[in-house]
Image (tube, rainbow, N blue to C red):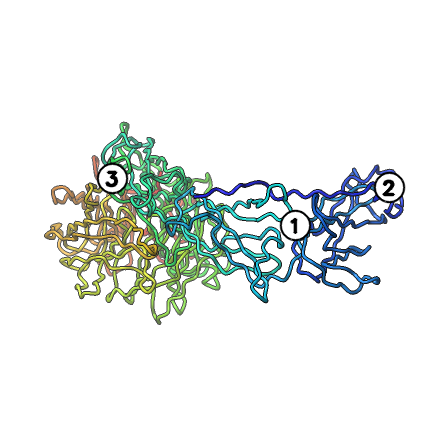
Amino acid sequence: MRRCASGLLLTLVILFVGAFTGCLGKSSGNSGNGGISTVSLNPGGIISLDIGTTQPFTAAGKYADGKPVIGLDIQFVVGVPAGATGPSPLSITNGGNACAGTWDISGAICSPGGAGIATVMAVINGTSSAVTTVYVHQHIDSVQIVSAEAVPPQYECFSQGQTWVYQAIAYSDPGNVDITNTVGPMSWSSSNAGVVTLTPIVVYPNPQNQENPIFQIQTTAKGPGITQLSAGAAGTSSNPFPYTTCLIKAIYLQIGGQGQAGNSITVDNGGSIAITATAVDTLYGVANTTALTSPPLTWSTTHPEVAAFGTTTTNTTGNNSATARNNLGGATLTASCSPPTCNIGVVPSLPVYASDGLLPNGTPGFGEISVDVTSTSAVPTYTAWVATTDCQDAPGCSSSLFKVTPGTNPISSITGLPRTPNSMMFNHLVSPRIYFGSDQGLMYVSVSNSTPSVTLVSNSSIPCNVSLCGKVLTISNDGQLVVVADTVSTPGQIYIYNGSTTTSSAPVDLILPNSGEIGKAAAFSPDRSKVFILTNLGNMYIYSTVDALTSVSTFAPATDVEFSADGSFAYVAGAPDMAGAPASSVSAFSTCSLPTVGSVNIGSVATSATPLNLFPSPLVQADLEGLTQTVLALEPPNVQFLTAQFTQDPVLYKAPQLQLTCNPPQMPSFTAGAPVNLGQGNFDPVYSQLVNDGTQLIIVARHLPAVLIFNVSDGTTVSVPLVDNPAPPDPLSASASTDGSQVYVASCDQYPNNDPTQPCGAGSVHIVNTISGGDFQQVPYTNINDNNNPNMCNNQGGSAPLCLPNLIAIRPQ
């Protein structure tokens, strides 16, 4: 392409006669403050005026000590640029009112003159201001943006770093006369600043005569996306001019750069996992064969409590390192081009997820990196926090919160919860919080503090859209966004609370349109770009900060939603597809949207029953054919293995237009194996979780006094019994460590007359070591101020019903 000469904006020099200072008015003295240091003129810089219009100028001065000049005469001086011929097209009154033409003798009537360039400066007691350059021109009726290069662009987009020069042409009616060389510099802007960098340049058609420069703009492709350029002067702007930095086409991942093959790695806790991402744009293979040097990528993990990228989850280096935390187990790491920082301005948003394929140098890349975090030292000792729902929203009732650590005296402190919790969930940060949902509003406790205390999102319990009443459904993988389903208000609402300590923003309030509709389950995509929300009426709502809220009917109330390893789609349990699959099925819905469809169903598989929960494996097989992920579906009394094969096709450059819509992943195969009976009959699970590196499924169920461990590799089940204390325990809630070595079970340990329909008479937390020791400790609640008080509800008097632990969660470390 042609390269135009570039330089600084036109430097204008004013020639003044030495007698100017003699024309200034007298000053009143400076009161001993020294001479005048600076004079400022407003407006300054460069301005543009229609012939016959007026423009007021003002000036002010300061002494050397910074004090303002008061009572001095100001002289406004009009001139022309150095080398210019002819009179100035501007005249100005003693008071600073300028005319793009000439004033009458009274300074009241401005008569139009000719086009040209004038200069204005203010002088106070011999000290001059900077020069303001004034372009006087005919009225601009329209502005058109055109290419200033010798040949038009070959493609509809520019690769990152590529430059191109544009020019804005100003026209005046009648006759559509080109007046560009009289209007001065145009004001340029971009609707999406992240897509392109704009650099003004000046071209002199005749270097020996620099009176009429041509002002142009050099564009440099910056971030993948689309934008609209605009140029204008004197209040007239061009129509939006489309500009595209080529979208990211595909992303390929490698461990530690190109030297290591494969997509899986085993590291000790505390170690780091270096990952290189290679991103190519839509012109790769069409007009270039190189990767992007500064790809704006988002780095994600499926299990941030096991391996996480810390605070650097977005960058443009193409490299990042995740840290293996002390919580042992498996995790999947990946990178994506996620709006609004990548593929900017495409509506609906067009995320691109990493995929398997060959890099420009011919080495294989992958769609995700599987990490198995182990330890060469002793297995960590985990701590659980326990609460109760038994206050039942009674006024004045304070629910106790305490931590349980293996030992002889595990209850060392108690924190009172002023509102009755209905749900309890840790975020995944190193400095963790427990979030508690309640009918009176959301609250949280930062348990890393030496003396934990409760923070209420709102001190008032009303209105619910301020206090955020309801149950906590999920927390984003970066630990910041909390989804709460309002179970109190009518109509039903979904709140998304931003718990970031660096961001202060109002919660998002999503009003569900159907009477009686309540949020039942939710999941964030790993890159946090979208959240899928399931309701009791068979709808799936898709929320994004980029796209409008949309919904997809699942034709039956779905039961669970979990995202795939690469984040490109979500597994939805109990959701039949458009082709009429039964409710006993699992369907895959794309993360990206079409203009009229919030999510695309890319495949479904029938199951033996409607799954209650889904567990995608953190270890994924990858090859050049795509990714293969195992998903466990819990369908009491069975567990069923599902196998999904999927790949992300590159976004293609399609002449004569770009692809700017959803690119759903392809699913060549989605199959189900024969169901495996756990040998416990039908059961009602209160907790289930895939642990270790995806090799074990932990299950705890009501009226089943044991911890079930399902071995994924051979399909066998081991039962670790809970100790009778004094009767067979009835689990109410449970939580397992990420490696499955420790399970904490909150249970009722005794019913009156062994009648489970009666209120529980005694309870404790069972600490189970699944590797050795079994149920080695049973921790009853004991108020540290009153050893005879087993009631977790305070301020209810001696006749209050017994409140026992029934919410529990293990703290990530």
State the image coordinates of residue 150 (x, y, percent, origin top left).
Answer: 45, 47
Label 1 packing within 10 angstroms: few (<14), some (14-19), many (20+) = few
State the image coordinates of residue 756 (x, y, percent, origin top left).
Answer: 23, 58
Given residues 366 and 96, the one toward you in this image is 96
Secondary structure, mark 2, is: loop
Q: Nearer the viewer, mark 3 or mark 2?
A: 3
Mark 3: which amino acid?
Leu
Determine contact: label 3, label 2, CB under 8 Å: no
CA distance for labels 1 and 3: 53 Å
Determine contact: label 1, label 3, CB under 8 Å: no
Mark 2: which amino acid?
Asn
Work out whether residue 684 can be spotted. Answer: yes
Q: Quadrant of the N terminus?
A: top left
State the image coordinates of residue 153 (x, y, percent, origin top left).
Answer: 40, 49
- Please give the name of the residue rendered at 53% of the width and 41% of the height, measured from the top-left corner: 5
Q: Identify the residue at the far bottom of this view.
A: 515
- Disc 3 designates what residue? 358
- Disc 2 designates what residue? 30
> Which comes sooner in the sequence, label 2 or label 1?
2
Q: Nearer the viewer, mark 2 or mark 1?
A: 1
Secondary structure, mark 3, is: strand
- Disc 1 designates what residue? 46
Mark 1: which amino acid?
Ile
Label 2 packing within 10 angstroms: few (<14), some (14-19), many (20+) = some
- Please give the name of the residue rendered at 48% of the width and 47% of the height, measured from the top-left corner: 165
Work out whether residue 763 can be spotted. Answer: no
